[in-house]
Amino acid sequence: MVKRISFGNVDCPVARALDVIGDWWSLLIIRDALDGARRFGEFQNGLGIAKGMLSTRLRNLVESGVLEMAPASDGSAYREYALTEKGRGLFLVIVALRQWGEDHLYQINEPRSLLVETETGAQVARLELQAQTGRPMTWSDTRVVRPAS
Amino acid sequence: MVKRISFGNVDCPVARALDVIGDWWSLLIIRDALDGARRFGEFQNGLGIAKGMLSTRLRNLVESGVLEMAPASDGSAYREYALTEKGRGLFLVIVALRQWGEDHLYQINEPRSLLVETETGAQVARLELQAQTGRPMTWSDTRVVRPAS
């Protein structure tokens, strides 16, 4: 495991989020869970991760309420890992990572997976930050306000 | 550093993005850079990270084109780290992490920092995934399509 100082109590939601899922294996596990993986072996085959490392991360994700243990969907004796509502909430984090990767880490025409609308097969639109009024915003239109201490 | 297998060549943009910034310190460095930090000492004070760990991560972020070295903005001899366009592109990843943290990791009324529109002071709107038509979508409306191999 990564040695880390817990930032769980600080007032920054970004730091607190990273305290739970800020480990690249954890984010890849969540990606695969969003993509349908449920069994230990499915995660292991998809990620090529050592069993012990995978066990630790799955346990941490269950402890933090991102995944939950569920009976096997086919009625067998296997236990499965299912995303909770909290876990499914990470979908936009994964989409944001994907869109940044698409923008900056691929050559033109280099093969890559696509996130599409199931119904139409069309690629999803780009995420966009908006003001409450619906006006599109960029980073430079925003600032972070800290709570009074 | 975290020991990792490079996923840089795979066809998943999420994995490739995490190969560059999938380390919680790196994401916190990027958060602080988006929030105005530019000097080594500013990152160090903000994060409480050991010098060697910070050096390694800053160097990696410069090598991967997320940060670039720039002369000090006040004309002094200090060197500063400035976000590139590629680095600023990570803003939505940080916003997505923030909004997930806000939703799931805070008690009601627990103090936390807020991301606001500079002009109005109003909180930014929630990120939302949309189809190309503008229709709001959730995770279950989407699927990942892999390239033909």
Image: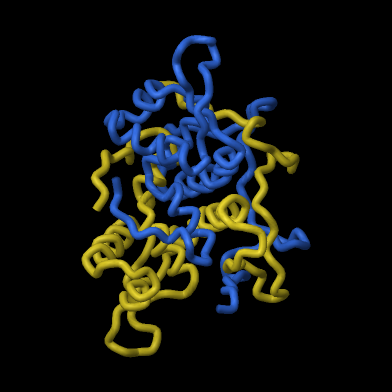
Chain colours: A blue, B yellow
Give left or right: position of B52 versus B112: left
Q: Residue B17, how many percent across, how many down?
A: 41, 46
Compared with B80, A111 (above or below) is above
Question: Observer-nearest residue: A143 or A5?
Answer: A5
Q: Residue B121, how many percent across, how many down?
A: 69, 74
Question: Observer-nearest residue: A33 or B120?
Answer: A33
Residue drawn at point x = 21 percent, y = 66 percent: B52
Residue drawn at point x = 37 percent, y = 21 percent: A41
The quarter of the image holding the N terminus of chain A is top left
Residue at the far right in the pictured view? A133
Compared with A87, A133 (above or below) is below
Q: Residue A134, how many percent across, how many down?
A: 75, 59
Q: Residue B105, how many percent across, how many down?
A: 56, 53
Give left or right: position of B51 versus A109: left
Question: Observer-nearest residue: B63 or A87?
Answer: A87
Q: State the image quarter where residue A5 is shown.
A: bottom left
Question: Observer-nearest residue: A76 or A28?
Answer: A76
Residue B70 can be seen, yes or no? no
Give left or right: position of B77 versus B145: left
Q: State the image quarter where residue B86 is shown.
A: bottom left
Q: State the image quarter where residue B110 is shown.
A: bottom right
The quarter of the image holding the C terminus of chain A is bottom right
Q: How many marks?
A: 0
Residue drawn at point x = 58 percent, y = 28 percent: B143
Residue A84 can be seen, yes or no? yes
Residue drawn at point x = 24 percent, y = 53 percent: B1
Residue at the far left in the pictured view? B52
